[in-house]
Image: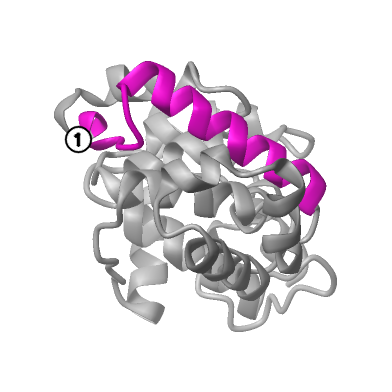
Amino acid sequence: MPRASLHARLARVASRLAWRYGRPRRRRQDPLDTLTETILSQNTSDLNSGRAFASLKAAYPRWEQAARAPVASLERTIRSGGLARIKSRRIRLALQGVKARAGGYDLGVLRRLPQTEADAWLCGLPGVGPKTRACVLLFACEQAAFPVDAHVLRIARRAGLVPPRASAERSHALLGPAVPQGRHLDLHLNLIRLGRERCRPRAPECPGCPIRPECDHGRRAA
């Protein structure tokens, strides 16, 4: 789909979702907190990842403590988030990468960089993919980034905004540049809400869906 056409469709989707759900906002978060929370959120629910992050911060109030902790201890601490063996290693590698590149456990430098440079900086960290980078830039740096999580990817495929078999990485590349200016945050959050409430993995509730006129699957289900 040409970028101009995708841009226009995303603008209509954003408007329809905002009419139904409003335009949600989020308080700006700490970049390193966001980086770690996003790693913990992979392949689990927000509830489980939230518990794991709270446990991690309680056990290691300073990130330098977490970076120096034995991996086995980190794994036990974040067990409630699932895939603890994998995530504990990713978190430790990311923290070590931040220390090596920033000289400390602080990603405030990202807020002073243009978006492309901030994204490139994060790209140099081990195990940090496009979704994690976009979450840090959007939620912690208020940049025009657009994270594609499982909900966003599912809806984008069903709606025909991206090809049916597009990967998450490919969908990031397609959707991010086409999101209307100033709509990255509310469109992302509203798509997640839609995915939780209606456009679930199985048996999506197409009748009454706010974006049905813009959705290939919804129109076929009419």
Looking at this view, name the residue that lies furthest to the bottom: 208
Magenta stretch, residue numbers: 84-110
Q: Is residue 183 left or right of residue 51?
A: left
Q: Give the percent coordinates (x, y) of residue 60.
A: 49, 57
Secondary structure under the numbered disc 1 in the rendered image: helix
Measuring from the top left, give residue 126's x and y in whole percent: 59, 22
Tell me the residue that label 1 is attached to: 111
Say whether residue 25 is left or right of residue 169. Answer: left
Q: Is residue 100 left or right of residue 206?
A: left
> Which residue is located at x 33 percent, y 55 percent?
185
Of the 4 image quadrants, the one containing the N terminus is: top right
Q: Residue at x 66, y 82 (%)?
A: 207
Judge left or right: residue 10 versus residue 219: left
Q: Which of the two residues, 157 or 108, is positioned nearer the viewer here? A: 108
Q: Nearer the viewer, residue 77 or 50?
A: 77
Above or below, 120 relative to 87: above
Q: Image point 30% across, 35% down: which residue?
A: 107
Q: Choose between 149 and 135: the one closer to the eye.
A: 135
| Residue 135 appears in the rendering | no
Residue at the (68%, 62%) spot, across then down: 77
Q: What secondary structure predominates along the stretch shown in magenta?
A: helix
User: Is 183 located above or below residue 18 in the figure?
Assistant: above
Q: Residue 148: percent from the left, percent from the top? A: 56, 45
Q: Is residue 68 visible?
A: yes
What is the three-letter code of the residue carrying label 1? Arg
Outermost residue toward the right in this view: 202
Q: Quadrant of residue 145?
A: top left
Q: Nearer the viewer, residue 84 or 2?
A: 84
